[in-house]
Amino acid sequence: MLRYLFVFLVFIHGLIHLLGFVKAFQLSEVNQLTQEISRPVGLLWLATALLFIATGGLYLSGNDKLWPILGFVSIILSQALIFMAWQDAKFGTIANVIILLVAIPAYAGWSFEDSYREDVKATLERTNAMESELITEAGLQPLPAPVQKYLRYVGVVGKPKVKNVRITFTGQMRGKGQDWFDFTAEQHNFYDEPSRLFFMKASVKGLPASGYHAYKGDEAGMKVKVFSLFPVVDIAGAELFKGETVTVFNDMCLMAPATLVSNRIEWEPIDDTSARATFTNQGVSISAVLYFNEEGQLVDFASDDRYSVDDRKQYRFTTPVRDYKDFNGYNIMSYGEAVWHYPDGEFVYGKFNLKSVEYNVTELK
């Protein structure tokens, strides 16, 4: 509703500028403007009207890159014209301020997300140069029996090895002692040199927020901004890198199972429905236990090597999953939860609904 009210304001504000054009060219009586307006200035009133209308159209189309820029140009021209006819047009400043207050965080949001997009583009160029190989039944043989069964259930045999994956989510998250907030997320993971680039948009207590988690090379960072302007989380370091290494491996297990055929992973059989894995990247090793059901589905993942962002302490981390569906030829989970096992009990802090998964993508959408 607020979205359409804002567009209405932009359109009406733009149309009002036509009065200056009509006044200058004496197309009709304009009692609202008492000062004389020259024809060259009248053309500026017309141009400003058209710019505001175009701004509203771009906003409606979801072009978050162009509409704020066009909005800034429109506001500057509009305010200059208002100063020239201040006695008659001064209240137009209110509309310009409102539009400016929306355009600034929109532009900041695009700029923040663009850092994610540029990282994705650069890494896609690297993986696009890689040749694809097929996963064979022989490649599964060194793995524990329940892992082999899972990969056959997923349907990886005979398909290309996964170089990268694009994933989109919707869901809810919360911190301990806090309310749930809704989010949408897109991420790209890469597996030649394990990388995870995750961008999230959310509404927290009614305020728009966005976050970028970047795991690449030997570094990991997490930034969260309210209105895409004001940092509320900005952390990095060895603890985060180790914790995000768990997350990278969790993604591999749940959403890109074909990557489990890898020399980065050491496997230890436990029983018919579980196995332990040790995943190593950049000299950092993490361990997790994978739990499967009789059908061969992976139903839970548990690791003691992840740190809680809230208090930077290490707790058991699990991700129970269910509702397997076909995503581009692979049978994988479509719903999962993220759970901390605190000393005072289990705490579900994330609920994830998988919307799309694309493997071996070649370009940014």
Image (spheres, grey):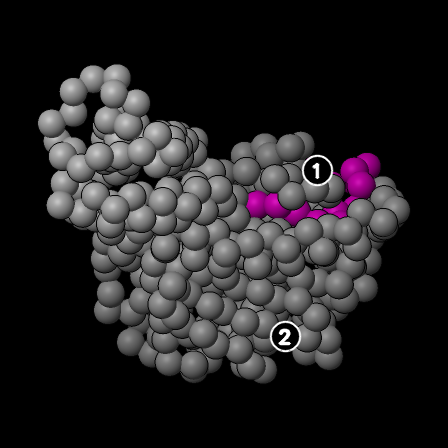
Which of the pair 139/248 is nearer the observer? Answer: 248
Q: Which residues are magenta?
A: 152-167
Image quadrant occupied by the N terminus: top left
Classed neighbour count for the residue bearing mark 2: other residues with Cα under 10 Å, few (<14), some (14–19), many (≥20): some
Q: Which residue is mark 2?
A: 219
Q: 353 above or below 308?
A: above
* Quadrant of the rendered image containing residue 116: bottom right
Task: Kindly state the secondary structure of the residue where label 1 is placed.
Answer: loop
Which of the pair 69/186 is nearer the observer? Answer: 69
Image quadrant occupied by the C terminus: top right
Classed neighbour count for the residue bearing mark 1: other residues with Cα under 10 Å, few (<14), some (14–19), many (≥20): some
Which of the pair 256/265 is nearer the observer? Answer: 256
At which x and y percent is residue 293? 55, 48
Task: Kindly state the secondary structure of the residue where label 2 is placed.
Answer: strand
Question: Which label sits on residue 155?
Answer: 1
Classify residue 25 as left or right of residue 224. Answer: left
Classify residue 160 as left or right of residue 13. Answer: right
